[in-house]
Image: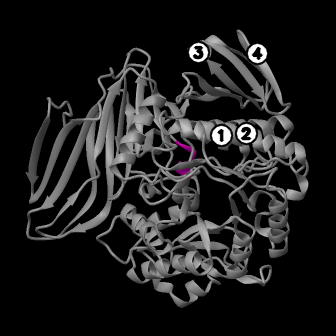
């Protein structure tokens, strides 16, 4: 299909073997929007696999080109890749759970290989051309979607329809596709896509700046009611040093994975008492759940085995996670629940109404949300996996009410827009910088920083970005002073949510001083982000020096540069393209202000905040 539309709009349609496909092209928001519909005009029901749009980029097939490979869900990596580079991807041979985590399809069709496929949107640029092209779906209510760039001259945009049934005389609308070309930066193009998508899907972007405490990155699964209460008392006493709004209990309280309203022996008081104590101390009460997962020893899975997505060939529930800490049974897997089942949807509404209205938790962290979109047989064959996930999220919102702050995590990006208030946009941070000594590829801070930069443009356009937690403690951590400061600098430069995750007994007045300083900058950037997006300095970058920038209301800017590498880096300020002006660098690790001239020296694993006056 040729997508060069004349002024105004144009329409085209075709009928093949009783199936009608029509598309309307509209010039809008600086590009072209494609609205497509599939109609069954035949006498028999049909199954729909995908709707595919082939887009011409205008680049020569032999041109050197790169594309932005956007990740599937919160923890999935995003970044620039060479077009026509690797034909294989490490996940091609990974286990099923890794693929169900990080791909919209556990097995890609051969013509849409993982190494060349982006989720939801992509950007293609060529060194031989002045313009870049963006293609992306600006709606995500009807399906998951991918864009494949196998060669520079073509993008294959695909709405994945999961073999859903289309009855005779019925039709299905495809989520709108947006195409734009411009000579602006890749990051600014991405922000344009995010702005259009947020407007189309009525994104929830008006929640206030979030500051809080989370139990996870010090206690992990070992959190207890006594430890939570001790930190709550410290937070109440240290409110002037650490001005926070939310206290959030993370994983480790539940009686079983799937049973979120009852607690284990470590929490004898129960959730209603815990929520009441948090509120009595003057904080919003927050709680973690993984609403689309359950383990075999849960009351939910024992009582409702029909609420799960199942394997078509065996009828067994689909495995979507594995964690020995989640279950006492020999089977350490977690299984995917099915929000296309009306009984489970009713359960979700009731559960989250109970957590918010009865127990008083107004901040809800929803984790491992990708499970609802796992491949398998569903209760309702008329719903795609994207629609199934969306149904589940909408049921949670309906139960929790409009006033609850809902944070998505481990979630396919598009389906949550307009439902959640915040979204994790990267993998977990950790109390260490890189991989563990075993090289196991566990969560690590440096990969989280990469993601915070890559998805910074989403903040205040799709939701409030959650860059994950800041760890301030100098003890019981493997992060150096520079590494802790680099984490702080990247989080605050993103303008996103600001939650700390330390045992408060390990923090002193100096930690409080640092927190108040970074919170002030973060709130300033967040305020500016309502008007002007936070942008990566180079969205396609693959080197060790990366950064972000946001324009300030006084005509200046605040930027962050990060050296994620293991060697010192010297950065020429002219290479950063910051548009000149007086520049001061803040070294958060040593509380120093440094006037900047031509170069900035960055030790390994360090960052600087730059304030630019023009």
Q: Look at mark 4 in the image and give the residue it sits on.
A: 595
Q: Look at mark 3 in the image and give the residue it sits on.
A: 614
Query: Pointer 4 and pointer 3: residues touching (CB < 8 Å)?
Result: no
Query: Pointer 3 and pointer 1: residues touching (CB < 8 Å)?
Result: no
Query: Pointer 2 and pointer 3: residues touching (CB < 8 Å)?
Result: no
Q: Secondary structure at mark 1?
A: helix
Range shown magenta: 89-93
Q: Look at mark 1 in the image and give the residue it sits on.
A: 522
The 10 Å Cα crowd at callout 2, few under 14, some 14 to 19, many 20 or more, is many
Residue at figure coordinates x 58%, y 77% from the top left: 355
Q: Secondary structure at mark 3?
A: loop
Q: Secondary structure at mark 2?
A: helix
Q: Quadrant of residue 406?
A: bottom right
- CA gap between label 4 and label 3 equals 15 Å
Position in image of residue 430 (x %, y %):
75, 50
- CA gap between label 4 and label 1 equals 21 Å
Position in image of residue 212 (x %, y %):
70, 56
Residue at figure coordinates x 33%, y 75% from the top left: 380
């Amino acid at each position: 299909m040729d997508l060069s539309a004349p002024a105004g709009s144009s329409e085209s349609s075709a009928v093949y073997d009783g199936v009608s496909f029509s598309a309307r092209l509209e010039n809008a928001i600086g590009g072209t929007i494609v609205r497509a519909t599939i109609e069954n005009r035949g006498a028999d029901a049909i199954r729909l696999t995908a709707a595919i749009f082939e887009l011409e980029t205008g680049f020569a097939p032999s041109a050197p080109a790169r594309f932005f490979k956007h990740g599937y869900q919160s923890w999935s990596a995003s970044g620039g890749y060479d077009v026509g580079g690797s034909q294989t991807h490490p996940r091609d041979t990974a286990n099923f759970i890794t693929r169900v985590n990080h791909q919209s399809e556990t097995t890609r069709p051969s013509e849409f290989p993982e190494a060349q496929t982006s989720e939801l949107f992509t950007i293609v640029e060529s060194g031989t051309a002045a313009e870049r092209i963006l293609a992306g779906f600006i709606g995500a209510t009807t399906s998951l979607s991918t864009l494949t760039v196998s060669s520079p001259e073509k993008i294959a945009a695909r709405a994945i329809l999961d073999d859903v049934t289309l009855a005779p005389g019925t039709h299905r609308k495809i989520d709108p596709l947006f195409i734009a070309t411009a000579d602006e930066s890749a990051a600014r193009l991405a922000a344009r896509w995010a702005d259009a998508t947020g407007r189309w899907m009525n994104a929830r972007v008006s929640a206030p700046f979030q500051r809080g405490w989370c139990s996870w990155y010090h206690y992990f699964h070992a959190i207890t009611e006594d430890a939570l209460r001790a930190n709550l008392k410290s937070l109440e006493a240290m409110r002037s040093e650490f001005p926070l709004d939310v206290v959030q209990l993370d994983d480790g309280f539940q009686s079983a994975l799937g049973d979120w309203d009852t607690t284990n022996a470590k929490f004898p008081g129960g959730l209603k008492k815990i929520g009441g104590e948090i509120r009595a101390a003057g904080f919003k009460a927050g709680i973690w759940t993984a609403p689309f997962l359950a383990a075999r020893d849960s009351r939910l899975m024992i009582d409702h085995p029909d609420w799960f997505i199942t394997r078509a060939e065996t009828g067994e529930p689909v495995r979507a996670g594995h964690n020995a800490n989640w279950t006492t049974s020999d089977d350490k897997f977690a299984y995917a629940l099915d929000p296309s089942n009306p009984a489970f949807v009713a359960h979700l509404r009731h559960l989250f109404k109970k957590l918010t209205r009865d127990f008083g938790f107004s901040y809800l962290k929803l984790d491992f949300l990708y499970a609802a979109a796992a491949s398998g047989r569903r209760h309702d064959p008329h719903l795609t996996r994207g629609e199934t996930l969306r149904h589940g999220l909408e049921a949670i919102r309906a139960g929790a009410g409009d006033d609850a702050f809902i944070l998505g995590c481990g979630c396919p990006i598009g389906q949550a827009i307009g439902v959640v208030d915040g979204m994790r946009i990267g993998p977990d941070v950790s109390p260490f910088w890189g991989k563990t000594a075993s090289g196991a590829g566990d969560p690590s801070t440096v990969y989280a920083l990469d993601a915070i930069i890559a998805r910074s443009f989403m903040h205040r356009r799709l939701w409030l970005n959650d860059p994950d937690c800041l760890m301030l403690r100098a003890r019981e951590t493997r992060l150096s002073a520079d590494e802790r400061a680099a984490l702080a600098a990247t989080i605050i430069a993103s303008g996103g949510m600001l939650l700390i995750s330390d045992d408060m007994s390990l923090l002193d007045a100096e930690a409080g001083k640092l927190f108040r300083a970074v919170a002030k900058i973060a709130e300033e950037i967040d305020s500016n982000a309502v008007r002007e997006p936070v942008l990566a300095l180079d969205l396609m970058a693959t080197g060790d020096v990366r950064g972000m920038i946001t324009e300030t209301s006084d005509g200046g800017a605040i930027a962050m540069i990060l050296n994620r590498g293991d060697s010192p880096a010297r950065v020429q300020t002219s290479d950063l393209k910051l548009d000149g002006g007086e520049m001061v660098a803040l070294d958060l690790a040593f509380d120093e202000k440094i006037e900047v001239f031509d170069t900035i020296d960055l030790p390994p694993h360090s960052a600087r905040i730059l304030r630019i006056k023009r």
